[in-house]
Image (tube, helix red, strand yellow):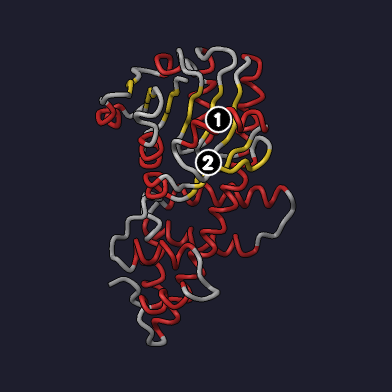
Amino acid sequence: MKVGFIGVGNMGCALASRLIGKIPLTVFDKDMKRLDVWDQEGVTVAKDLRDLAIGSEVVLTCLPTSNEVKSIVLGKNGISSYLAPGSLIVDMTSGDPAVTREISELILKNKIEFIDAPVSGGPRGAREGTIAIMVGGSHAQFERVKNVLSYISHNIIHAGPLGSGHSIKLGNNLLNLICRMGTLEVISMLVREGVAPDMAVDIIQKSSGRNYATEITLPDNILSGKMNQGFSTAMMEKDSSLALKIGAKHELDMALGKVAQTMLERTIDKYGLNADMSAAASLFESETGAQIRP
C-alpha cells in the first residue's frame, strides 16, 4: 500500500517519521524548506499535490486548520482531482467536525472516502509511538486504515462515526486548557503562600488533583525553564473556540470553558498568537506576583 502524507510541520513531521521504512511513503508540504530533510531512503518527496496523489491509496493530512484541508482536497489542483476511486483520505488535523462532514460528502461523488483521525499527546508522544489516535468513520474504514496507523502508534481508538474524532479532540483540548489555567492559578496561590512550585506540582501529581499540567506541562516545559511545549496560543485558541462553538450549538453554558478561554485571550493579548502555550505561566506570574519558573 502506497501512502501519501501532506503537512510535515512540527506534529506532521513526528507522525510521518514513524512510517519511514515500514511502508512506501510519499510526503509533501507547501513549505518546500520542510522537505529537505525527507530526501532519504524509503521516502519519495512529491513536487506537488498531483505528484503525491497519483498512485497513493491512502493519504494522511496534518495541517493547521480544516479550511486548509478543504483547500488541498477540493481546491484548484486538489488531491481529489487525482486520487483513484476507492482511495481514502485520513485527516489527522485538529479539525472542525462540521467541515470534516462537508468534505466527506463532497468527495463521495468521486468515490473517494474521507475520515478523521486527530491525535493527542504532542510531538513527544508521536515520536515515541504512544500518541492517541482517535478515528471517526465507519467500522470498515477503521479496519482499513488501522494497520497504517499502527505504525505511528499502538494507541488507536475507533471514536465513532465520521467527525467523532475531531469532536473528541476539540473537547480534549478545551479540557486541557481548563486544567492548565486552573493548575496555574492554584500553583500561583501556593507559591504566594510560601510553597516551592516544584514541591507543589510534585505533591499534586501524587494526589487527586493531578492532571496533564502537573504530569507533563509544568515539569517538562515550565519548571524546567524550557518554555517550549511546541503548541502555540493560536492553535489552542482555534481548538477551544471550535469546542465552545459545539457547546453553543447544543445551547450549553460551557461556563468553565469560557473562563479558561478568557485567560487564554489575556495570554494572547500580552504575548501574541505565535507564543508557545507555556506563556500562560508568564501571564500568571505577571498578574499574581508568584514566581513559578526557575
Pick whichever, 32 or 39, lies toward us: 39
- Taking the image as shown, residue 112 lies to the left or right of residue 189, namely right
Q: Give the residue type that dot 1 points to.
A: Val
Q: CA distance from mark 2 to mark 1?
A: 13 Å
Say which quarter of the image contains residue 269: bottom left
Q: Give the residue type that dot 2 points to.
A: Pro
- Pointers 2 and 1 in contact (C-beta within 8 Å): no
Residue 189 x/y as whole percent: 45, 80
Pick whichever, 70 or 135, lies toward us: 135
Task: Please tell me how crowded label 2 is: few (under 14), some (14-19), or many (20+) other residues with Cα within 10 Å.
Answer: many
Task: Please tell me how crowded label 1 is: few (under 14), some (14-19), or many (20+) other residues with Cα within 10 Å.
Answer: some
Residue at horizontal 38 percent and vertical 47 percent from the top: 128
Residue at horizontal 41 percent and vertical 78 percent from the top: 200
Q: Which residue is mark 2?
A: 118
Q: Which residue is mark 1?
A: 145
Q: Secondary structure at mark 1?
A: helix
Q: Is residue 175 above or below residue 144?
A: below
Q: Secondary structure at mark 2?
A: loop
Say which quarter of the image contains residue 197: bottom left
Residue at horizontal 59 percent and vertical 38 percent from the top: 135
Residue 263 x/y as whole percent: 49, 63
